[in-house]
Amino acid sequence: MGNHLMAHGIARLGPLLKTSPAYGLRPLVWARKASSVENFTTNKLPKLRGAIDHDSIFVISLPITTKRSYFYCNHRPSILDKSQLKTFPLITKIETKATDLAKKGWNKLASSENKINKTIIKYVNKLLYTIPYEENCLRSFPSRNSMIREINEEAVSRGKVNTDSGALVQQEITNLNIPSEQLKRIPLIHPKFQKPQLVLDQLRELGEVNRPTHLKYSIACLIGVPLTLPFALVPVVPNVPGFYLAYRAYCHIKALLGVKHLDYLLENDTTPTPATKHLVFKDMGALSEVYEQSGINLDLDRGDRQEEVIITKDIIEQLCSRFDLGHLKEDLKKALDQESKRLRKKTTE
């Protein structure tokens, strides 16, 4: 149960991976307490193929509570021409190879029949499940240097770009001296009941609140790695503490890079439209339909409303099925669990 959690997390980190982050991983099953929001019974809505273009760049907001959302940046290098992959920074290529090796090592440990290894896997998976879901949100945003952007008609008409994909890596954008005005804004998809300003405020809070946390723990984990070297001298037991601390240091650094890139994407725009310099809001009624099936009050504008969970396991199932978001299912369930526990604790204080 849950033997591939770390592999699932590591697979999401390599920005050059050409497949879905959950590719090749069996579904994870977790024992969970009942959520504070009861599941609802309804006829499933039809699957909307093509409603969201997964071979494109976009950010999606999926509300978890009346005040918090799960954010995911869909960023797939597979949309680039093969020749463009060479323009990725060297550090990004090294990172991809390193994460592939780490994933193979973890899968080998997870498939081991050794009782000690099985016990280690069990407790590490439990530990990983306690990691705040917001970290995965931030890690889904690649560093600015490895970000892919699509160009608008103006850049094409000026003959600056010679690519069929209409997409460029940041290094190409810099080399061609393409101004931000000639880059297409990245769509930020959200349910219709969620106002753009609310989404914007939650995104800013996501970065501001988590920045000091990831800075603190990235330093702590890096300091802790050398202290685990004595475990490497034990031939029977692998140096799990060292591996775990190195992995967590990497995750915290990736989250910090996500925060930094989020700051860039949230740069203010001079126009009065609900957008930033690099993001444009796209409300989707079909997303709202899934939430509305639960009968939960979706009025998020009431300032006096007490925070409550507005997503359920059934909503998660329908979102993942209807919009081909299966690779986010475990993260969304984790977000539901963590927010439900947080609000229950809040009401008892």
Image: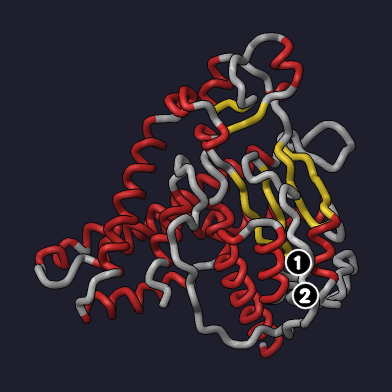
Q: Residue at x 78, y 63 (%)?
A: 46
Secondary element under disc 1, as helix, strand or loop, is loop
| Vertical arrangement, residue 205 with respect to residue 80, above or below | below
At label 2, the amino acid type is: Glu
The crowd level at tag 1 (other Cα within 10 Å; few <14, some 14-19, many 20+) is some
* Residue ID for mark 1: 67
Q: Give the quarter of the image for residue 334.
A: bottom right
Q: CA distance from mark 2 to mark 1?
A: 6 Å
Residue 307: numbered disc: 2
Which circle's residue, 2 or 1, is located before the other in the chain? 1
Q: Position of residue 113 (x, y in %)?
A: 22, 76
Q: Is residue 113 left or right of residue 337?
A: left
Tag 2 and tag 1, C-beta contact below 8 Å: yes
- Camera-nearest residue between 120 and 24: 24
- Camera-nearest residue between 22 and 138: 22
Q: Position of residue 305 (x, y in %)?
A: 86, 75
